[in-house]
Image (tube, grey):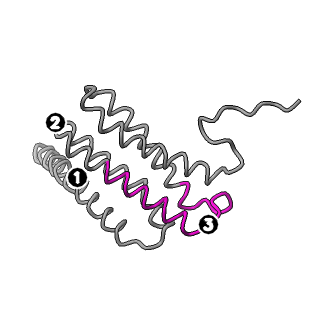
């Protein structure tokens, strides 16, 4: 019975240790797949997983008081999102009729903006500044994706149209 408990405890420790190492390798592997992908739709479909992995990295850097490293990863995410948006725009795909890729990028952006809002609440005003600057760029890309997906809707944040009656 003791041997079984000991084996389970050892397995748990090994899982926790290797799980964190695999999470870091997972980010590198996702970045590698992202960089190698030439199709803009498939590239955009990688963004939710890549964004999640990069935000784990950002959170880790913040927890270790490495704010500059966290901002660097956030800027990398923004650049990847912009690259995807540019690729999707260049493809001339009608996002309203064929949303694949567009919706994944927009979902990733929405989640990243939510995560970023949570992160900045825990930072001082000076620490927040670079995060908020990058957030503006992410918000612009997000609004652009929403407009591509829903072109007949007023842009987010636009005042409601007045009734002509």
Mark 3 neighbour density, 10 Å: few (under 14) some (14–19) many (20 or more):
some
Q: Secondary structure at mark 1?
A: helix
N-term-proximal mark, 3 vs 2: 2
Q: Which mark is residue 93?
A: 3
C-alpha distance separating marks 2 and 1: 22 Å
Say above or below: 143 vs 37: above
C-alpha distance separating marks 3 and 1: 39 Å
The range drawn in magenta is 75-103
Q: Quadrant of residue 133?
A: top left
Q: Which mark is residue 65?
A: 2
Mark 1 neighbour density, 10 Å: few (under 14) some (14–19) many (20 or more):
few
Residue 108 is left or right of residue 121, and the answer is: right
**Image coordinates for residue 159, horizontal then vertical, percent:** 66, 32
C-alpha distance separating marks 3 and 2: 42 Å
Q: Residue at x 42, y 61 (%)?
A: 83
The residue pinned by badge 1 equals 19
Q: Residue at x 62, y 53 (%)?
A: 149
Residue 95 is left or right of residue 164, and the answer is: left
**Image coordinates for residue 22, horizontal then vertical, percent:** 23, 57
Mark 2 neighbour density, 10 Å: few (under 14) some (14–19) many (20 or more):
few
**Image coordinates for residue 158, horizontal then vertical, percent:** 63, 36
Main secondary structure along the magenta-highlighted residues: helix
Q: Secondary structure at mark 2?
A: loop
Q: Residue at x 49, y 45 (%)?
A: 140
């Amino acid at each position: 019975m003791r041997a079984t408990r000991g084996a389970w405890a050892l397995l748990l420790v090994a899982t926790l240790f290797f799980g964190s190492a695999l999470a870091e390798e997972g980010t590198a592997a996702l970045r590698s797949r992202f960089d190698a992908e030439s199709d803009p739709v498939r590239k955009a479909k990688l963004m939710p997983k890549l964004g999640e992995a990069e935000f784990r990295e950002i959170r880790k850097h913040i927890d270790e008081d490495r704010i500059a490293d966290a901002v660097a990863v956030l800027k990398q995410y923004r650049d990847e999102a912009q690259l995807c948006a540019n690729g999707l725009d260049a493809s001339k795909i009608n996002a309203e009729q064929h949303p694949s890729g567009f919706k994944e990028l927009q979902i990733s952006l929405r989640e990243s903006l939510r995560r970023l809002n949570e992160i900045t609440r825990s930072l001082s005003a000076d620490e927040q500044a670079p995060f908020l600057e990058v957030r503006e760029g992410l918000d612009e890309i997000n609004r652009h994706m929403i407009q591509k997906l829903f072109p007949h809707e007023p842009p987010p944040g636009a005042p409601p149209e007045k009734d002509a009656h």
